């Protein structure tokens, strides 16, 4: 009788062992996939940082070269560029002020016309 019970429990134990092995394999696979994702994310971040560092280095080099070239020309080009930028900013400001004055004049005219219309309609 014991043998029969042992034989009956043997498939259940085997199934439980297989299920446990599958669960452990699944957990290992999930862990490996997570580690792979972390590694890929780390590599992508390192590439991004290297790219930013390279771009910054190139920009710094360009600025340095422009400054050196400008210094060799006696700094006149830089001063001319700054003066041009100031001139453009000044022109833009003057244009904005002119547009503002036109808007204000138009609003004043509209108010005047509305007042005249209201005065005509009043008894």
Image (cartoon, rainbow, N blue to C red):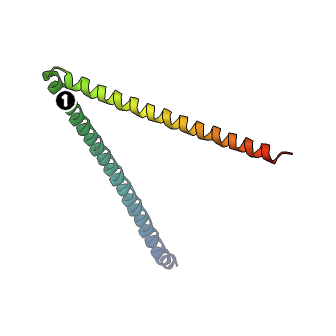
Q: Which residue is mark 1?
A: 66
Percent across and percent down for residue 11 are 45, 76
Which residue is depicted at the point 38% across and 63% down?
25
| Displayed quadrant of residue 72 | top left
Which residue is depicted at the point 56% across and 39% down?
103
| Vertical relation: 60 (above or below) 113 | above
**Residue that extends furthest to the right in the rendered view of this protein:** 123
- In the rendered view, does 9 fall on the left or right side of 67? right
Q: Nearer the viewer, residue 105 or 97?
A: 105
- In the rendered view, does 1 fall on the left or right side of 90? right
Percent across and percent down for residue 47 are 27, 45
| Displayed quadrant of residue 53 | top left
Q: Nearer the viewer, residue 37 or 2?
A: 37
| Vertical relation: 56 (above or below) 72 | below
| Vertical relation: 18 (above or below) 57 | below
**Residue that extends furthest to the top in the rendered view of this protein:** 74
Q: Nearer the viewer, residue 58 or 77?
A: 77
Secondary structure of residue under mark 1: helix
- Quadrant housing the C terminus: top right
Which residue is depicted at the point 41% across and 34% down?
92
Q: Nearer the viewer, residue 60 or 84?
A: 84
Q: Residues within 10 Å of mark 1 (few under 14, many from 20)?
A: some
Which residue is depicted at the point 37% across and 60% down?
29
- In the rendered view, does 36 fall on the left or right side of 18? left
| Displayed quadrant of residue 119 | top right
Percent across and percent down for residue 18 are 41, 69
- In the rendered view, does 27 fall on the left or right side of 73? right
């Amino acid at each position: 009788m014991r043998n029969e019970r042992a034989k009956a429990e043997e498939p259940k134990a085997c199934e439980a062992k297989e299920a446990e092995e599958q669960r452990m394999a699944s957990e290992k696979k999930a862990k490996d996939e997570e580690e792979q994702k972390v590694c890929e994310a780390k590599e992508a971040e390192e590439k991004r940082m290297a790219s930013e560092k390279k771009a910054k280095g190139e920009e710094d080099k360009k600025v340095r070269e422009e400054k050196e070239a400008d210094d060799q020309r006696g700094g006149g080009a830089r001063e001319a560029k700054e003066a041009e930028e100031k001139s453009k900013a000044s022109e833009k400001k003057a244009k904005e002020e002119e547009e503002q004055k036109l808007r204000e004049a138009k609003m004043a005219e509209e108010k005047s016309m509305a007042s005249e219309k209201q005065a005509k309609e009043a008894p």
